[in-house]
Image (spheres, grey):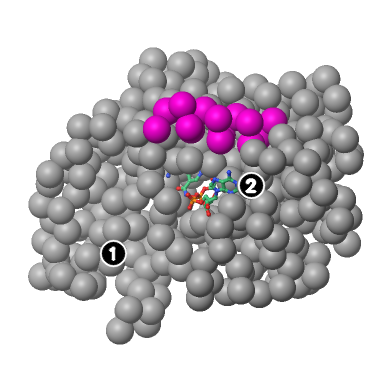
Amino acid sequence: MKNILVTGALGQIGTELVSALRQKYGEDHVIASDLRVLENHPISQGKNFEILDVMDYERFKYVAKRYEVDTIIHLAALLSAVAEAFPKRAWEINMTGLVNGLEVARELNLQFFTPSSIGAFGPNTPKINTPQVTIQRPSSMYGVTKVAGELLCDYYFTKFGVDTRSMRFPGLISYVSLPGGGTTDYAVDIFYEALRKGNYECFLSADTRLDMMYMDDAVQAVIDLNEAEGSRLLNRNAYNVSGMSITPAELAKAIQEEIPAFEISYKIDPVRQGIADSWPDQIDCQSAKDEWGFNPQYTLESTVKEMLSQLNKKLF
Ligand code: NAD
Ligand code: AKB
């Protein structure tokens, strides 16, 4: 039976991942942690929750030891738009937090998973069918930390034998928890505004094409990669994964199929537009499919239907 410690567990991914892991491995086998406590958040109000700042190595190790964990899922990080506003802080949290987690994993002999991102690619990367192994010279601080993170995870695997695993998430679309300050946040915000106001002012241009994935597919992918046979993982840090490649105009059109009166307008945020323009249009996920069976279920159409139906119940 696995014992898993999740850092940054109150964020967009952690909120849903912790619930799914607890359903699979049992309530007492998944320890959630975060820098903060959120009132009314079921995870920080429930049991098996610890306040853990990943910058505090001694406490990180103490919590991992106390619960006798065998796996760390390290989610604590600053996302792309916030990282661009606070680059030095992003470097410190994304890198020191990561190296602390890797050191705990090395010392206690634990499996270690952390997400990378499509942000690990840059303007020189091939934009279409972006290969698993290709040029990675990102132009955002977030991307710099993600490439460095991939390399660091490889280093801990080859040098110390730590069982590190990672995937490059695209923008994740979900209704349970709001996104934490990324470039792809429009693809979540648009659903709230569509239902509340019937219109949405998008901060990316109509034709900005990016990879996205519905959260259920992301959660399943994390479980599948962490359970995969290690000897099959030739590209362990980090796999390209995606569920769809879409533009704001295409997402708006799919929403209009369900809410015909919905309207989208555009007011470009130059910072987030610049980041989005430096990322691929559509990445190739074949290695993830071949090496551990990545198999996303949600299309643009089913994601839109599910988001609107779930948010309708949540908001009204
Ligand atoms: P989020 O911003 O929603 O949540 C991050 C959590 O980390 C927050 O709850 C925050 O309180 C916590 N945190 C911040 N600093 C901390 C610290 N010093 N110690 C402990 N906790 C701290 O982020 P998310 O969307 O859940 O992303 C999790 C991981 O997945 C990140 O590495 C992110 O780069 C990656 N990722 C996310 C997406 C996405 O679309 N959500 C896409 C690609 C990659
Ligand atoms: C962001 O936009 O920063 C994240 C990501 C794709 O890494 N959603």
Comparing marks 2 and 1, which lies closer to the viewer?
Answer: 2
Label 2 C-beta lies within 8 Å of the nearest ligand 1 atom: yes
**Image quadrant for the N terminus?**
bottom right
**Image quadrant for the C terminus?**
bottom left
Q: Is mark 2 on a helix, strand or loop?
A: loop
Amino acid type of disc 1?
A: Phe
Q: In this view, does 165 lie to the left or right of 242?
A: right
Q: Where is residue 168 in the image (x, y as percent from the top left)?
A: 54, 37
Q: In this view, does 293 lie above or below 99?
A: below
Q: Is residue 71 visible?
A: no
Q: Is residue 163 left or right of residue 52?
A: right
Q: Residue at x 27, y 28 (%)?
A: 274
Q: Nearer the viewer, residue 107 or 277?
A: 107
Identify the magenta region.
Answer: 86-99
Amino acid type of disc 2?
A: Asp
Q: In this view, does 193 lie above or below 284?
A: below
Label 2 sits on residue: 53
Picture quadrant where residue 16 is located: bottom right
Q: Is mark 1 on a helix, strand or loop?
A: helix
